[in-house]
Image: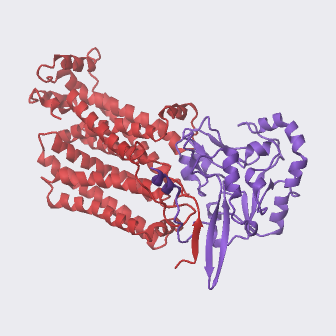
Amino acid sequence: MSVSRRSFFSGLSASLGGAVGAAEAATPGIRAQVGGPRWGMVVDTAKCIGCQACTVSCIMENAVPEDSFRTIVSTYEVREGDRTAMVMLPRLCNHCEDPPCIPVCPVGATYQRADGIVVVNADACVGCAYCVQACPYDARFINHETQKADKCTFCAHRVDAGLLPACVESCVGGARIFGDLNDPGSTVSRLLAKNESKVLKPEMETGPRVYYLGLDDAFLGKVEAEPTLWHPSHRQEARS
Amino acid sequence: MNPVVEVLNVTREAAWLPWAVQYFFLIGLSVGCFLLTLPGFAFARPAWLRLARLALIGALVCGFAAPVALLADLHQPGRFWRFYAHPNLNSWMAWGAFFIPGYLGGLCLYAWAALRPGLATAPAPARAGLLRRAWRLAALPWLPPLPRLLPLAAAWAAGFAALVLLYTGMEVMVLRARPLWATPFLPVQFAVTALAGAIGLVLVLDRLLPPRDRGMEAVLNRLLALSLAAALAVGGAWLATGLLGLDATHAAALASVAHSPEWRVTAIWAALAAAVPAALALWRPAGTGWLSGLIALHAAWMFRWTVFIGGQTVPKTGAGLYAYHLPLGHDGLLGILGTGGFCLFLLIALTALLPWEAAGPARAAEAAAAPVTPAAPGRA
């Protein structure tokens, strides 16, 4: 299944018609049939302008609480001689093939769907934050409103309805491309076949399914840089 | 000047709160104190009897307070039942949920077996007839003497104590996402500092609950110096592994904090917190126990604070270090002080309500029954 934005729109009505089946696929324990999709994302960093539209649309779509983020575009200024350039690095859950967040969960609340999306069963989560510690990408956090683990779900509710994740839908430069990695004809598969791609922290051997095009090796792990001055907690302090 | 400037990124707050520090500190102290009771109670060494009695109080106080801190860290304590209803046995934390009651159940049984002879025979404080009747009832007089219960309960509790030490270390060590935690030195250091802290606690209790025993103090101080020397050795081995680049994870862990002045001060402070009480314990083994004990307690707590709170200030992907400000409410200072207050309450309650000075194997209790003064159990 090739999942470009256009094909999503064209298949929207059909997908909405099959909403019942999609809901079943999202239920824990019910695996999709063999040969189903394996969702993944390709991020073309050359196309990202750092507008944070993805950050905002994710917050609006998923009711992410204030001062928390499921995705963000880390922004760096790089100086080389007389030249200065900006590096944009959209970060989100990598929906790893071997997610380190799953085995540590003491109650099995976090799990991987048959289509590869890693989700949290909020009804079962005890808020122990073990998964938050285990994620090498800092992609998880404790939601202050629910006091449970929270993370990017690739907007699974939208995907199940045949829509794109909110961050992909809103990306101004078309830097985020979402699709089925199992389909050799999908846009993501063709991009990965044609271009050299990288994943974050490959040494962790988690098998990330978010791939980056055009990203320098210096930004794959913990970035050695002058730290940013702004912290969300500063605003809370100023308010109190 | 670094050619890369992080213009915009997100700060991730510490997800494991000071409650976690309190839990790991208290459960470590409890296990350490329990181990210190074994020579006097399980192996019936008369010279270790007072030490064992003080250590039993320490094990019970810290053992009862530790799970309270752990539940508080769940943000919603009522969720704990899910650990038992839906355990994921791939998780060390899930195993821990079974080890904790196993240990505490064994500890309570062990304490009852040690206290039973005293409950049956020790004279209660003056004008405390009700307390004496409660003691007699708590001794379950309709049951026959159970001389094998104490060593059996000791074996049960010792097994679970080892599992608690194992799981608390492994639970943190398996987190490869944090290089500072992903080291086999960590479980060893948790165990060694837990023992040092427990020895420190017994030294402080010896001061608080007279009559003081100088001979025991000297023995404890020697043990303290040994355990702190071991802690310094383990810390030194971790540092050497990182400095010499013998392992990439250790080198990354060291590199993530080496540039920070705060972490350097912390490292010096930690080394002094271990070296000073060790030197004090060797220099003056008698008369300084309360001071070396307090510093050792501080060292055990500080190690856990540095590991958990300090460790979470190291970003996994971002630059520099996250700032941590201790909240004043229940998720911060109030939680720490509240745990301390709860421990103090338990200490007063247990020493006031239990004939702890007569605890031990049956023969020891009979010997202790005679010299116990009427006001003894209420001295705290």
The number of numbered badges drawn on the structure is 0
Q: How is the image coloured?
A: by chain
Residue B77 at x, y percent in the picture? 47, 34
Left or right: A150, with B97 as reference point: right
Residue B182 at x, y percent in the picture? 50, 58
Question: Chain B is which colour?
Answer: red
B148 to B217, vertically: above or below: above
A192 to A165, vertically: above or below: below
Residue A209 at x, y percent in the picture? 72, 57
Q: Residue furthest front?
A: A239
Residue A172 at x, y percent in the picture? 77, 61
Q: Residue at x 60, y 35 (%)?
A: A124
Query: In front here: B161 or B349?
Result: B349
Query: In front here: B195 or A70?
Result: A70
Left or right: A193, with A63 as reference point: right
**Quarter of image, res A111:** top right
B118 to B88, vertically: above or below: above
Question: Chain A is which colour?
Answer: purple
Left or right: B101, with B41 as reference point: right
A29 to A232, vertically: above or below: above
Query: In front here: B142 or A49?
Result: A49
Whether residue B360 can be seen here: no
**Quarter of image, res B222:** bottom left
Whether residue B95 can be seen here: yes
Q: Residue furthest bottom?
A: A81
